[in-house]
Amino acid sequence: QVQVVESGGGLVQAGGSLRLSCVASGSIWSIASMGWCRQTPGKQRDLVATITAGGITNYADSVKGRFTISRDNAKNTVYLQMNSLKPEDTAVYSCKVVVITPRYGDHWGQGTQVTVSS
């Protein structure tokens, strides 16, 4: 069993900042990558940012220069620092963890709401 828990969402004004955290626990020996996706009602879930075990990052064009993803491998934790937030960043942000061993699989958290007011 693998558990993924996000925290740090909330309400912020445009131009403000928030930091999301995601902790993976349970049956985990090694993780390939961790990342964040977001979804608004009626739309598909979109990739926001990912980071590999080696620290290679990937960002959606819409968040480049504003969001920073980082990772603490020892704690199986990933962070998303979100700066210069815009109303269009409003969404439910979900954390995805790709576990390699002992059993390969994708694991998702429940999501955390981020609301940016104009």
Image (cartoon, rainbow, N blue to C red):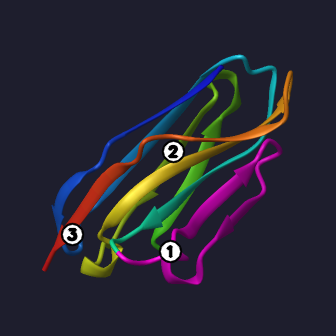
Residue at (28% x, 59% y) in the render: 114
Residue 78 position (above or below residue 56): above
* Mark 1 or mark 2: whose residue is earlier in sequence: 1
The residue type indicated by label 3 comes to Val
Choose top left, top right, bottom left or bottom right for residue 73. Answer: top right
Q: Which mark is residue 34?
A: none
Q: Which mark is residue 79?
A: 2
Tag 1 near tag 2, CB within 8 Å:
no
The location of residue 50, given as percent across then percent down, is 66, 57
Residue ID for mark 1: 44
> 35 or 17: which is nearer to us?
35
Tell whether label 3 touches label 1 (CB within 8 Å): no
Q: Position of residue 88 (x, y in %)?
A: 31, 80
Q: Residue at x 42, y 56 (%)?
A: 93
Q: Is residue 21 above or below residue 9?
A: above
Residue under pointer 3: 116
* Residue at screen point 50% across, 37% down: 22
Dot in front, 1 or 2? 1
**Residue 26, x across and y down, in percent:** 64, 16
**Which part of the image, by quadrant, shows the C terminus?**
bottom left
